[in-house]
Amino acid sequence: MLEKNMQVLADVASPTGFPAKIFYAGRGEGDQFGLTRFHVMIDDFSYGIFTVRGDFTTLEQARARLLQPIREGMSETAAEFAVRHLWVHVDSNEYYALG
């Protein structure tokens, strides 16, 4: 059974060179009903939360979904895509905040 803040994946490739960790953040509610939320951490820094279609109840289901390619014929997994996407947006926000 998945529990909030449970680590789902470790050692996900990230653009920083430090491996990312992905934690279960809970079931989607309201307009996110039917989605599962995950939290990305890289080097003990929060990079945000992303959602995946599906209502996962076990660690195995969550891992299997995050390790699937994002599209047929592609090698990038859903987890790698989410980490890269969140990293790009955090860094661009920091750049403009410092600018």
Image (cartoon, rainbow, N blue to C red):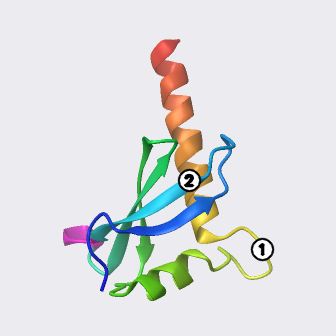
Whether residue 25 is situated above or below residue 72 in the rendered picture: above
**In the image, what residue type sits under mark 1?**
Met
Q: Is residue 42 magenta?
A: no
46 horizontally vs 64: left or right: left
2 horizontally vs 84: left or right: left
* Residue visible at 50% across and 57% down in the picture: 21
89 horizontally vs 54: left or right: right
Mark seen at residue 14:
none
* Residue visible at 65% across and 40% down in the picture: 16
User: Residue 82: percent from the left, percent from the top?
Assistant: 55, 59
**Tally of numbered discs:** 2
Quick one: 88 or 80, which is closer to the camera?
Answer: 80
- Quarter of image, res 8: bottom left
User: Residue 35: percent from the left, percent from the top?
Assistant: 35, 76
Whether residue 12 is situated above or below residue 60 in the rendered picture: above
Outermost residue to the top: 99
- State which quarter of the image contains the N terminus: bottom left
Q: In the rendered image, which residue does mark 1 sit on? A: 74
**In the image, what residue type sits under mark 2?**
Ala
* Residue visible at 61% across and 60% down in the picture: 11
Q: CA distance from mark 1 to mark 2?
A: 20 Å
Q: In the rendered image, which residue does mark 2 sit on? A: 20
Q: Which residues are magenta?
A: 27-32
Label 1 neighbour load within 10 Å: few <14, some 14-19, many 20+? few
